[in-house]
Image (spheres, grey):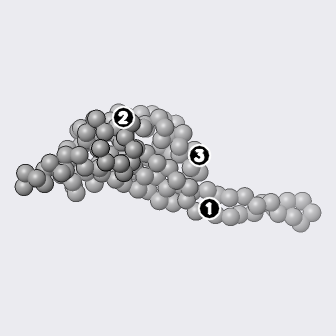
Amino acid sequence: MREKYQKLKNMEIRAESKSVRISPRKVRLVADTVRNLSVSQALNMLTVTQKRASVAIEKTIKSAVANAVHNAKVKADGLIIKSIEVFEGSSLKRFHASTRGRTHPYKKRSSHIKIVLTDDKTQTKGAVYGAKS
Protein backbone atom coordinates (compact mmCIF):
# COMPACT_ATOMS: atom_id res chain seq x y z
CA MET A 1 0.00 0.00 0.00
CA ARG A 2 2.86 2.37 0.76
CA GLU A 3 4.40 1.92 -2.72
CA LYS A 4 1.08 2.70 -4.36
CA TYR A 5 0.82 6.04 -2.53
CA GLN A 6 4.33 7.04 -3.62
CA LYS A 7 3.49 6.34 -7.25
CA LEU A 8 0.38 8.51 -7.00
CA LYS A 9 2.36 11.43 -5.59
CA ASN A 10 4.04 12.31 -8.90
CA MET A 11 1.18 11.16 -11.09
CA GLU A 12 -0.05 13.13 -14.05
CA ILE A 13 -3.81 13.42 -14.38
CA ARG A 14 -5.18 14.05 -17.87
CA ALA A 15 -8.44 15.13 -19.40
CA GLU A 16 -9.34 15.74 -23.04
CA SER A 17 -12.16 17.49 -24.81
CA LYS A 18 -12.48 16.56 -28.44
CA SER A 19 -14.23 18.27 -31.34
CA VAL A 20 -14.97 21.53 -29.53
CA ARG A 21 -16.55 23.79 -32.14
CA ILE A 22 -14.21 26.75 -31.60
CA SER A 23 -11.17 27.37 -33.75
CA PRO A 24 -7.85 26.36 -32.16
CA ARG A 25 -6.41 29.84 -32.54
CA LYS A 26 -9.14 31.30 -30.35
CA VAL A 27 -8.81 28.53 -27.76
CA ARG A 28 -5.02 29.02 -27.54
CA LEU A 29 -5.52 32.67 -26.57
CA VAL A 30 -7.38 31.59 -23.45
CA ALA A 31 -5.15 28.56 -22.79
CA ASP A 32 -2.05 30.75 -22.66
CA THR A 33 -3.53 32.81 -19.81
CA VAL A 34 -4.03 29.85 -17.44
CA ARG A 35 -0.94 27.77 -18.25
CA ASN A 36 1.24 26.90 -15.18
CA LEU A 37 -1.32 28.21 -12.66
CA SER A 38 -2.91 26.34 -9.81
CA VAL A 39 -6.34 24.89 -10.52
CA SER A 40 -8.17 27.31 -8.21
CA GLN A 41 -6.43 30.35 -9.75
CA ALA A 42 -7.15 29.09 -13.26
CA LEU A 43 -10.84 28.52 -12.55
CA ASN A 44 -11.15 31.99 -10.98
CA MET A 45 -9.48 33.56 -14.00
CA LEU A 46 -11.67 31.65 -16.46
CA THR A 47 -14.90 32.77 -14.78
CA VAL A 48 -14.10 36.43 -15.47
CA THR A 49 -12.66 35.90 -18.97
CA GLN A 50 -14.98 37.24 -21.66
CA LYS A 51 -14.17 34.61 -24.30
CA ARG A 52 -16.30 31.69 -25.48
CA ALA A 53 -13.33 29.32 -25.24
CA SER A 54 -13.07 29.90 -21.48
CA VAL A 55 -16.19 27.77 -20.95
CA ALA A 56 -14.66 24.81 -22.83
CA ILE A 57 -11.34 25.07 -21.00
CA GLU A 58 -13.07 25.43 -17.62
CA LYS A 59 -15.12 22.32 -18.33
CA THR A 60 -11.99 20.34 -19.25
CA ILE A 61 -10.14 21.49 -16.11
CA LYS A 62 -13.08 20.44 -13.94
CA SER A 63 -13.06 17.05 -15.67
CA ALA A 64 -9.34 16.64 -14.95
CA VAL A 65 -9.91 17.56 -11.28
CA ALA A 66 -12.71 14.99 -11.07
CA ASN A 67 -10.37 12.39 -12.59
CA ALA A 68 -7.75 13.25 -9.95
CA VAL A 69 -10.18 13.06 -7.04
CA HIS A 70 -12.10 9.93 -8.05
CA ASN A 71 -9.57 7.85 -9.98
CA ALA A 72 -6.17 8.83 -8.57
CA LYS A 73 -7.42 9.64 -5.02
CA VAL A 74 -5.54 12.97 -4.98
CA LYS A 75 -6.80 16.06 -3.14
CA ALA A 76 -7.93 18.87 -5.43
CA ASP A 77 -6.29 21.58 -3.32
CA GLY A 78 -2.67 21.11 -4.39
CA LEU A 79 -3.19 20.46 -8.10
CA ILE A 80 -1.54 22.70 -10.68
CA ILE A 81 -1.78 22.77 -14.44
CA LYS A 82 1.31 21.20 -15.92
CA SER A 83 0.38 21.68 -19.57
CA ILE A 84 -2.47 22.70 -21.82
CA GLU A 85 -2.28 21.64 -25.44
CA VAL A 86 -4.73 22.67 -28.14
CA PHE A 87 -4.77 20.66 -31.34
CA GLU A 88 -6.70 21.18 -34.54
CA GLY A 89 -9.72 18.93 -34.88
CA SER A 90 -11.78 18.12 -37.93
CA SER A 91 -13.14 20.93 -40.07
CA LEU A 92 -16.61 21.24 -41.51
CA LYS A 93 -16.36 22.40 -45.11
CA ARG A 94 -19.08 24.87 -46.05
CA PHE A 95 -19.79 27.25 -48.94
CA HIS A 96 -21.01 30.84 -49.21
CA ALA A 97 -23.22 31.75 -52.12
CA SER A 98 -21.63 34.41 -54.28
CA THR A 99 -22.51 36.45 -57.35
CA ARG A 100 -22.97 34.98 -60.81
CA GLY A 101 -23.82 31.54 -59.46
CA ARG A 102 -20.43 30.99 -57.85
CA THR A 103 -19.55 29.76 -54.37
CA HIS A 104 -16.74 30.55 -51.94
CA PRO A 105 -15.54 27.74 -49.64
CA TYR A 106 -14.72 28.21 -45.95
CA LYS A 107 -13.99 25.94 -43.01
CA LYS A 108 -15.72 25.76 -39.65
CA ARG A 109 -12.81 24.67 -37.49
CA SER A 110 -12.87 22.60 -34.33
CA SER A 111 -10.24 21.87 -31.71
CA HIS A 112 -9.09 19.21 -29.26
CA ILE A 113 -8.09 20.40 -25.77
CA LYS A 114 -5.73 18.29 -23.64
CA ILE A 115 -4.97 19.27 -20.03
CA VAL A 116 -2.39 17.60 -17.77
CA LEU A 117 -2.50 18.25 -14.02
CA THR A 118 0.12 17.40 -11.43
CA ASP A 119 0.42 17.83 -7.70
CA ASP A 120 4.21 18.36 -7.64
CA LYS A 121 5.30 22.00 -8.01
CA THR A 122 8.85 21.13 -9.10
CA GLN A 123 7.70 19.46 -12.34
CA THR A 124 6.09 22.49 -13.97
CA LYS A 125 9.20 24.59 -14.63
CA GLY A 126 11.02 23.43 -17.76
CA ALA A 127 9.37 20.02 -17.82
CA VAL A 128 8.77 18.33 -21.14
CA TYR A 129 5.66 16.23 -21.51
CA GLY A 130 6.55 12.55 -21.44
CA ALA A 131 10.19 13.06 -20.39
CA LYS A 132 11.46 11.25 -17.31
CA SER A 133 13.66 13.08 -14.84
Q: Is residue 96 left or right of residue 6?
A: right
Q: Which badge, 2 or 1, is on the more N-terminal residue?
A: 1
Residue appearing at x 43%, y 45% in the figure: 84
Query: Helix, strand, or loop for circle 2?
Result: loop
Q: Earlier in the sequence, mark 3 or mark 1?
A: 3
Q: Could you tell me the amino acid type at mark 3? A: Arg
Q: Work out how far the residue at label 3 is from the one at label 2, CA to CA, in angstroms.
A: 24 Å
Q: Residue at x 13, y 54 (%)?
A: 4
Write down the quadrant of residue 80 in the picture. top left
Circles 3 and 1: CB atoms closer than 8 Å: no
Q: Earlier in the sequence, mark 3 or mark 2?
A: 3
The answer to whether the residues at label 3 and label 2 have Cβ atoms under 8 Å apart is no
Q: Which mark is residue 125?
A: 2
Quadrant occupied by the C terminus: top left
- Per the image, label 1 sits on a secondary structure element best described as loop
Q: CA separation, marks 2 and 1? A: 34 Å
Residues at discs 2 and 1 in contact (Cβ within 8 Å)? no
Residue 70 % position (x, y): 21, 55
How far apart in space, not on screen, are marks 3 and 1 (Cα)? 13 Å
Q: What amino acid does circle 1 point to?
A: Ser
Residue, disc 3: 25
Mark 2 or 1, closer to the camera: 2
Residue 74 x, y percent position in the rendering? 20, 47
Towards the viewer: 86 or 17: 86
Residue type, numbered disc 2? Lys
Q: Which residue is mark 1?
A: 91
59 is higher (above) or lower (below) than 89: above
